[in-house]
């Protein structure tokens, strides 16, 4: 599986490691992903998602179903049927 959040679309980005002597070498910044099961009451089913910590915080605020509708409207929902 790829390292992409299924709700926010966050993915690895590239940058540089900068040493004390100011040498630069390429590196990757990986998103903070967690594999988590959620229960959707409206559909009466469990789903497993790979989500970032930022998405988990928003799910705690809004609820999983509302947040998924918001992501679908924005167009970032990847590989999930609502």
Image (cartoon, helix red, strand yellow):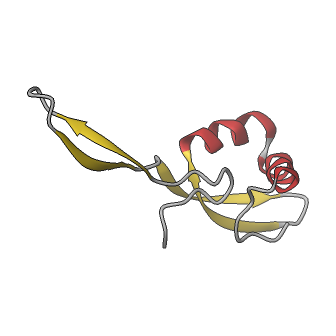
What's the residue at 80%, 38% (across, down)? 62
What's the residue at 83%, 52% (across, down)? 65
Question: Against 13, is 21 above or below?
Answer: above
In percent of width and height, residue 75 lies at 80, 56
Q: Quadrant of residue 17?
A: top left
Judged from this view, the residue extending furthest toward the top is 20
Q: Quadrant of residue 58?
A: top right
Question: Against 76, is 58 above or below?
Answer: above
What's the residue at 75%, 69% (across, down)? 80
Query: In the visual, does 41 lie left or right of 33?
Result: right
Query: In the visual, does 40 lie left or right of 8?
Result: right
32 vs 74, nearest the viewer: 74
In percent of width and height, residue 46 lies at 72, 67
Give the number of callouts.
Answer: 0
Query: In the visual, does 1 lie left or right of 23?
Result: right
Question: Against 23, is 33 above or below?
Answer: below
On the rendered image, what quadrant is the C terminus found in?
Answer: bottom right
5 vs 13, nearest the viewer: 13
In percent of width and height, residue 52 lies at 56, 48
Q: Quadrant of residue 57?
A: top right
In percent of width and height, residue 45 lies at 79, 68
């Amino acid at each position: 599986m790829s390292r992409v959040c299924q709700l926010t679309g966050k993915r690895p980005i590239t940058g540089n490691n900068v040493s004390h002597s100011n040498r630069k070498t390429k590196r990757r910044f990986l998103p903070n992903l967690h594999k988590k099961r959620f229960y959707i009451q409206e559909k009466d089913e469990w789903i497993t998602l790979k989500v970032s910590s930022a998405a988990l915080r928003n799910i705690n605020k809004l609820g999983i179903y509302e947040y998924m509708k918001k992501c679908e409207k924005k167009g970032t929902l990847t590989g999930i049927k609502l």
